Image (tube, helix red, strand yellow):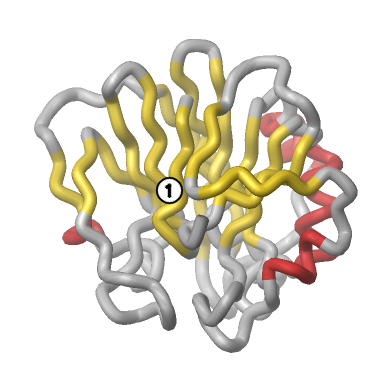
Amino acid sequence: MKITSNGHSCFTLEADGFTLVTDPYEDGCLPGLPNLRLNADAVISSHDHYDHNFLGAVTLSGRQCPFAISTIHTFHDDTQGSQRGENLIHIIEYGGVRVAHLGDLGHELSEEQLARLRGLDAIMIPVGGFYTIDAKTASSIADRIGAPVVIPMHYRHEGRGFKEIGELSDFLALRDDVVKSGKSIEITHGMNKQTAVVDFGG
């Protein structure tokens, strides 16, 4: 499965000619990032905020998408959603490869939630804080999930991203396995443990 960054929390997942887009953002809402115009077989969103749910950015093929998708209900804050509402974690599987997009997770995960996320090949996890978990909490959660590939998202970097959130470097400073993967990474079984910087800027 190939994962390509479109910026912020938006990724394109590709396998066997099929594509799935996660969390497309609204035109003009993110400093330093261009408007999205993507083609895909399916699109998913973790929640209905403008920087994650602009479905108009994606033109759908009309084909049935073969990715198997399951969800875990979580919250966008650490007060049971009272500040920012609910959030969905999506677990996406195809050809035996399993990855998870954690959306705008805003709190620690329960043991039951962590159990459902074990055995993954990769996770995409927010690290910027303010609106989501911060770098320290994200690093701890990533370690507890134990996926070999950890892909940070929802951060500020090189003038891109919301000014309120933390820099990518804040998260990378906590990791000892950083690999710069450019805009895309191929996910397979048995990959080396790595914090993969899959960044829109390459």
Q: Is residue 84 found left or right of 117 in the rendered image?
A: left
Instruction: Kindly give the residue lying farthest to the bottom in the view shown.
Output: 163
Q: Residue at x 54, y 36 (%)?
A: 185
Q: Residue at x 38, y 42 (%)?
A: 12
Q: Position of residue 3 (x, y in %)?
A: 47, 38
- Is any part of residue 116 visible from this angle? yes
Indicate the secondary structure of the residue bearing disc 1.
Answer: strand
Q: Position of residue 101 (x, y in %)?
A: 54, 45
Circle 1 residues within 10 Å: few <14, some 14–19, many ≥20: many
Q: Is residue 175 found left or right of 198 in the rendered image?
A: right
Q: Which residue carries the number 1 mark?
A: 11
* Occupied quadrant, residue 4: top left
* Occupied quadrant, residue 163: bottom right
Location of residue 98 with respect to 6 vertically, above or below: above
Location of residue 141 with respect to 34 vertically, above or below: above
Q: Residue at x 60, y 53 (%)?
A: 74
Q: Position of residue 18 (x, y in %)?
A: 28, 25
Instruction: Kindly give the residue lying farthest to the left in the view shown.
Output: 62
Q: Is residue 102 found left or right of 116 in the rendered image?
A: left
Q: Amino acid at mark 1?
A: Phe
Q: Position of residue 106 (x, y in %)?
A: 66, 65
Location of residue 28 with respect to 124 vertically, above or below: below
- The count of marks equals 1
Q: Residue at x 57, y 26 (%)?
A: 187
- Is any part of residue 73 visible from this angle? no
